[in-house]
Amino acid sequence: MTIAIIGAGLAGASAAEELRNAGYDGDITLVGAEPHAPYERPPLSKDILLRTGTAEDALVHEAEWYAQQRIELLTGTRVSDLDPAARTFAVDGRRISYDQLLLATGATSRHLPMADDSGAPVVHLRTIEEAEALRNHLSGALLVIGAGWIGLEVASAARQAGGTVTVVESASTPLAGPLGTQLASLFTDLHREHGVDLRTDTSVISIEHDAHGTRARLSDGDEVHPSVILVAIGAEPQVSLAADAGLAVDSGILVDARLCTSDPHVYAAGDVANHDHPSLGRLRVEHWDAAIHQGRHAARSMLGGQEPYGRQPYFFTDQYDLGMEYVGHRGPDVDEVIVRGDRERRVINAVWLREGRVVAGMHTNDWDAIDPLRAWIGRQATPALRDTTTSLADALG
């Protein structure tokens, strides 16, 4: 059997590694558009920006590892003409055949035409090159459009580098979707305490750039003069290859519980996969943990595994001296939140419930909490869980 993987990011590399760990001894071809061996993206907005780590530190494996594992790694290579009926695709004038194929094509930064067309210095943050370019501007005047995880992590890095930061967010409370307003305000307060000019309920109306600099006019009537603009308004799954090949797509490549697409010989994993989760329904998760574990699971499915992928989503963030871990999927219909800890010191944990059952949990700077939080997902709340004087672990009984 021959297995090909299109997308040499974390999901693709994790799948290739799992194939070998599972005893698969056949051919593996791993194709990536970027010029690097597969790397992890969280350091782009953390260690690389803060100069506490390098691009080499972010690599999943050194390039030599792929040769040692007999994995043909093609970098800087674009794939075209995927033909599921013939089970082939084209790269650089060569056709590659496969018996099983994994699409791990990831996502690309969403662009803001107003910014792109302005002629101003505009950056996004998705690649090593973009992180290294942005790092050189952190000590200047930074305008961040979008107060999601990437926007706020970059704001944190810029403030620690001595830069001035204005963050513009159209929502009234950043991060209210994943956290709800009660806990999202932790991050609003955190950034304002560290000197970030965080403008909520605000949008950018116009951006002009000339020899005298950049002027961004805001909906609140103010004008800011950044030396660089970071557009951090989300990402778009890269589905064009799959769509052109006739695979089912809808806000990602549609996959079943096993991560199989509408073609029985093609799978998808990571940022691009719109997954039919066995307990959560359809969702697409753009996080480091999902890339690793979906990549591994897709590998096992390609080798004949029938188990559904049922892992709960997990993500983390580090901003200033605050670290957070989150597990589960809060969703829009939660009806209760239970919070423990010291909000003033920002050492807390929280669980969200829907009809009395725990669906998600998080902690900030409470490093013993993540395992009990995982254990609570899916359980019915008990009086001990609602008693905030009882620890999460002890409440498990």
Image: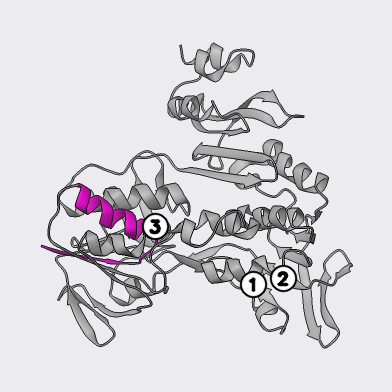
* Amino acid type of the residue tagged 1 in the rendering: Val
Residue 395 belongs to the span the image colors magenta:
no
Residue plotted at (56% across, 42% down) = 332
Mark 2: give few (<14), some (14-19) or many (20+) Cα within 10 Å.
many
Magenta stretch in the rendered image? 1-21
The answer to whether residue 260 is left or right of residue 332 is left
Mark closer to the observer (2, 3): 3
For disc 1, the marked residue is: 123
Q: Which mark is residue 10?
A: 3
Up the image or down, 239 lies above or below 161; here it is: below
Residue plotted at (41% across, 39% down) = 312
Q: Secondary structure at mark 1?
A: strand
**Residue 294 placed where, x, y %?**
34, 50
Measured Cα–Cα span from mark 1 to mark 2: 6 Å
Residue plotted at (62% across, 39% down) = 323
Q: Tell me, what colour scheme is on the image?
A: one colour
* Amino acid type of the residue tagged 2 in the rendering: Ile
For disc 2, the marked residue is: 229
The answer to whether residue 227 is left or right of residue 288 is right
Residue plotted at (40% across, 63% down) = 250
Q: Which mark is residue 282?
A: none
